Image (tube, grey):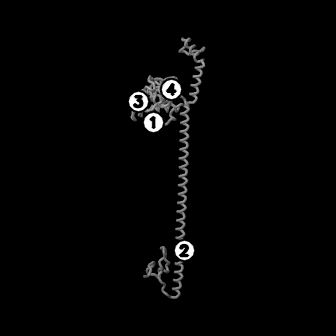
Amino acid sequence: MKVPPRWCSDKMDCWEALVDEWCTGSWRAVNENAKDRRSQMVGVPHHQGSVNLLQFGRNWAHHNKREMPHLYDLYGMAHTASYKKAKAFSESGLDNPNNFTNISSHQKLVAYRDAGKATKGDDINPSQEPLDPALVRISVGGRPHGSIAIGDGIIRCPLTLPEIKAPQSSSCPKIMRRPRQVELAIEAALQKERLANQAALEKERLASQAALEKERLARQAALDERDQTTARLIEEERSRNEASQRALYELFLGLCEKSGQVPPPMPVFSSIGTNNSRAASHDPSPGVSPP
């Protein structure tokens, strides 16, 4: 009361009236209600500071030396970063709600875009035209708290919701109820939990698939090893049989030499090997079976 602001220093009667109003029970109740609503908000309200959207746009345009965007883009930019850090808004920025300071601002922009596409066609681009006050009221559920949800009170719509809805056909989008902050927070938490569950299921599926693939490779390796072992044992058995046959033939050659008999030609074995020199001297065509 004793320290009035500069803009009210020469109007003390107005300042006293404001202070008296702020001290009333009804104003305190309104103030507490607003504090409760703000406490339910996930994230900060915006990055505009104490200026409205138009001044935020002028500051951004001056800082970046570009033209000032339309209100739809300004609203999205003001809810992502300050004018010094905010980037030019694009519709692709709506794909990730985490780009915004709070989920409520993201929900409003998405609802307005979807309502515009349903009303005016898929080719509509909210960034290229001024905000439609009637469409804003339809998409976000009327005029909560006495002002239109997008635009910070800059745009006005004198029509009531029944007056807006009266000339519309049944194919026009329904007037949506504006969700509360706590409802959006609950929905965001549920969506986050759903995504986490999906990620866990996908991780479990990949782990199970990897385990099955590992088991299949292990079985295949065991089968390959068994086949190799079987082939090696068969080859060793064949080699032993050939060695035994050659040894018997060598013994037979020795007996034939002692008795002065001509030995028969050496039989052909199943695998090609180096013939004994003694067998080669008695057989003019080694390796060929007699008819």
Marks 1, 2: nearer the viewer: 1
State the image quarter where residue 218 is shown. bottom right
Q: Is residue 190 above or below residue 153?
A: below
Q: In this view, does 116 lie above or below 244?
A: above
The quarter of the picture where the N terminus appears is top right
The residue under label 3 is: 168
Cα separation between marks 1 and 2: 77 Å
Give SS at disc 2: helix
Amino acid beneath label 4: Pro
Q: Around disc 3, counting alpha carbons within 10 Å, would you say few (fewer than 14), some (14 to 19), or many (20 or more)?
A: few
Give SS at disc 4: helix
The residue under label 2 is: 240
Identify the residue shown where x is 49% and y is 78%: 277
Cα separation between marks 2 and 4: 98 Å
Amino acid beneath label 3: Gln
Asked whether the beta carbons under mark 4 and mark 3 sit within 8 Å of each other, the answer is no
Asked whether the beta carbons under mark 2 and mark 3 sit within 8 Å of each other, the answer is no
